[in-house]
Image (cartoon, helix red, strand yellow):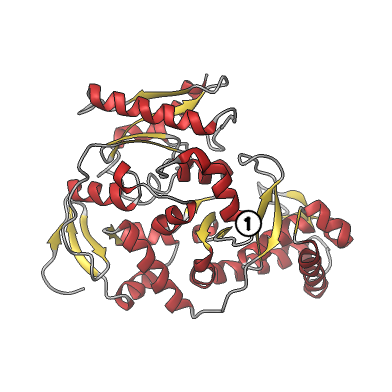
Amino acid sequence: MDGEQRYIGVAERRARLALRQRLAPAARATSPQEVADALVALHGSDPATVYLAVGARLADPSETVAATDRALYGDDRSLVRMHGMRHTVFVFPTALTAVVHASTGLAVAARERATLVKNMAKAGAPDATWLKEVEESTLAALGRLGQATAAELAREEPRLREQFVYAAGKSYEGLHSVSTRLLKVLGVEGKVVRGRPLGSWTSSQFRWALAPEHPELDTAEAQAELLRHWLTACGPATEADLKWWTGWRVTDVRRALAAIGARAVSLDEGTGYVVDADLDPVPAPDEPWAALLPALDPTAMGWQERDWYLAPDLRPALFDRSGNVGPTVWWDGRVVGGWAQRPDGEIVWRILDGKGVGRDAETAIAAEAERLRAWVGATRVTPRFRTPVEKGLAG
């Protein structure tokens, strides 16, 4: 990471975003797997986000739902929905399962299990030995059933219905079943993953499935590998971006940067990093481009420092109070507005930053809105995290 630093300006960063995030028309993908490989991770806490993020990046989005279902739930399971960075659910390429688990899940998993055992003991519930027996029985039942809801698993293992007071004395105290807490712990531990939803692709109710088998990797090596994947897709990024996206300690970020031989570059906000072979200039796409990206889209949420593609004065309208981005309208590498779907299915949008957004831009944005409406069809999509512009447009 030593030596003279090359400057990468806003225009080149937006060019990299357009091409590597599969947003410019010439860079669009042919399959959900290709999208996931390019982005590394798709936010999965809102089920609709995955499909909308994929559809925005496919050359032909008409098969978005069917193709994404096959990738997530078909025989090949090339994509998997599991806990990852910052204790958040993402969709990853299945080949990264071991890397994600070792790099981000192990430390969180140890804390989650200890917290569960502690809270059960405080509530007078059975001990860790009992919990381990229930866990083994539950995993065996899931192996027999293939996929199952928590209720279906409780019919196989009735002890999952046991209830106890969780977080007694805290503001979030509540009566929880063993199944609720245990399945969450098993998810963080990489033993189970989210399976097929009970309803349509927008449903937040889902089944559980056993996690794909994967080797146990060294944590430091896995962190280096995950960071290499993400910097390839999203570099350059600052140390603050990397710490925020991974949820790691700054010492872990610096160790991983050194392990992959990352190169320092100069950005408007300070020092950034790219992978070793990524110092060559990246030309802009041949034509300006428009995109309608969903709430929690990995491009809009990809960096902590976002001024190079998102004007600070737009944030109150486009983010909720917890920092979750809503649906965004993009023009040529920057966020210029927001969009929503009305109850009758119409896709509506509003420009919030009109600088450089002329008639050609509005025509291209309208075409993207129609492209989205065509493949979403009769399905109605309401983001899990509502934002001021989205709520206002939805009516």
* Left or right placement of residue 177 versus residue 84 in this view: right
- Asked if one can make out residue 295 in the rendered structure from this viewpoint, the answer is no
Count of number-bearing discs: 1
In the picture of the structure, the residue carrying the numbered disc 1 is 74
Residue 77 lies, with reference to residue 140, above or below; the image says above
Q: Quadrant of residue 337?
A: top left
* Left or right placement of residue 394 versus residue 178 in this view: left
Q: Residues within 10 Å of mark 1 (few under 14, many from 20)?
A: few
* Left or right placement of residue 128 versus residue 236 in this view: right
Image quarter of the N terminus? bottom left
| Coordinates of residue 186 in the picture (x, y in percent) | 68, 65
Image point 64% across, 61% down: which residue? Answer: 75
Q: Quadrant of residue 200?
A: top right
Residue 301 lies, with reference to residue 390, above or below; the image says below
| Coordinates of residue 180 in the picture (x, y in percent) | 74, 55
Image point 50% across, 38% down: which residue? Answer: 62
In depth, the one of 172 and 224 nearer the eye is: 224
- Asked if one can make out residue 176 in the rendered structure from this viewpoint, the answer is yes
Name the outermost residue toward the left. 4
SS class, disc 1:
loop
| Coordinates of residue 300 in the picture (x, y in percent) | 38, 44
* Left or right placement of residue 343 versus residue 306 in this view: right
Image point 21% across, 67% down: which residue? Answer: 264
Residue 346 lies, with reference to residue 105, above or below; the image says above
The amino acid sitting under disc 1 is: Gly
